[in-house]
Image: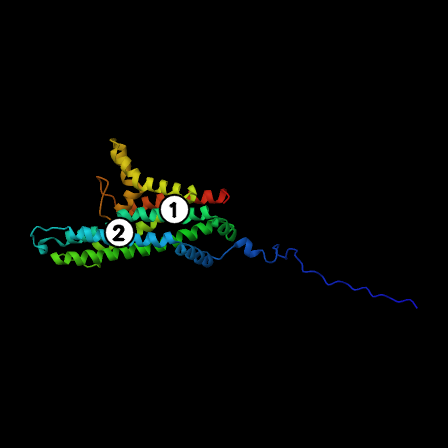
Amino acid sequence: MTETTATKTPAPAASSSPAADGTVPGAASAVHGLSATGLLRSEWIKLRSVRSTAWSYALLVVVSLALAAVMSSTLDLQGADASMIPAADQATFIAQTATFGVFFGQLIVAVLGALTISGEYSTGMIRSTLTAVPRRLPALAAKAAVLFVMTFVVGLAANLGSYLVASLVLSRQGLGVSIADPAVFLPVLGGALYLALIAVFALGIGTIVRSGAGGIAVVLGIVLLLPMVFQVIAAPWAATVLPYLVSNAGINMFGLMSFSPVPIEWWVNLLVVLGWLAVSLVGAAAVLKRRDA
């Protein structure tokens, strides 16, 4: 008798062929990367876990409070009755005291903004970031959004704290204006907004330069040195350009100092700052899309 051997048909292997819609199963996450919420959470974790962030924000608050204390304590009315000083002048002085730290705080947040992205390039973490977000630009947008919100919140807290310090010191001389007064609250709010915008501006510069030292040098050159250069140029065109530099427009934005012989509305100064910010971010987006990490 001939023994018949049954042939077993092997089970079909898992298919890796494209699905009906043309996509490979499991590839969707690799193509689309993290969700918007996941991106924001990731950037929030990265920003707050870096020691330079905590030190920078702490320094911003300390400097603001210290300068407010020094500036308010040096006021000498020389025996004059504080009640005779017009309320508008009192509000202006208290607003100047509460926002005086912004002049130095802009340098602190500018350095932080440049380091936020350049630190990832120096450590190689940027490769992991761009792998998780292949389209790249959402990662830049998430970094900018998180940095803007954190800097605005800390800047507002620093300005409000400076207002409290100034009010406490000046109350001994009979000066006092409520924070609800628009002449005080709007400059306090505008100062915090400017700090947030300059931090994101520095983020864009850091993305373009991709170097910690280089990014800091470029940002501080634009914010600090460029106005000095234009001030020493004895030419009418230099005086015309001076109010439209990012730091001058930002300080003018909250209405406490003017670098132009002709008054410029606060919203014009805001548009100038936003213009500088747009140039920075557009350049950063172009570099991020074209260059490899």
Q: Amino acid at mark 2?
A: Val
Mark 2 falls on what kind of element?
Answer: helix
Residue situated furthest bottom in the rendering: 1
Residue situated furthest top in the rendering: 235
Q: Quadrant of the N terminus?
A: bottom right
Look at the image and name its color scheme: rainbow
Q: Picture coordinates of residue 43 (x, y %)?
A: 43, 55
- Reading the chain from its start, which is encountered first: label 2 or label 1? 2
Mark 1 falls on what kind of element?
Answer: helix
Which picture quadrant has residue 7? Answer: bottom right
Disc number lying in front (2 or 1) = 2
In the shown orientation, is residue 292 left or right of residue 51? Answer: right
The total of numbered circles placed on residues is: 2
* Label 2 crowd (10 A; few <14 / some 14-19 / many >=20): many
Q: Picture coordinates of residue 155 (x, y %)?
A: 30, 54
Relative to 85, does residue 290 appear above or below in the rendering? above
Q: Picture coordinates of residue 90 (x, y %)?
A: 15, 53
At x 10% / y 55%, what residue is drawn? 82
Which picture quadrant has residue 48? Answer: bottom left
At x 27% / y 51%, what residue is drawn? 191
In the shown orientation, is residue 143 left or right of residue 232? Answer: right
Front one among 47 and 236: 47
In the shown orientation, is residue 182 left or right of residue 53? Answer: left
Mark 2–mark 1 Cα distance, whole angstroms, equals 20 Å
Residue situated furthest right in the rendering: 1
Front one among 262 and 249: 249
Q: Which residue is mark 1?
A: 114
Q: Which residue is mark 2?
A: 63
Regarding residue 279, the answer to whether it shows in the image is no
Q: Picture coordinates of residue 262 (x, y %)?
A: 22, 40
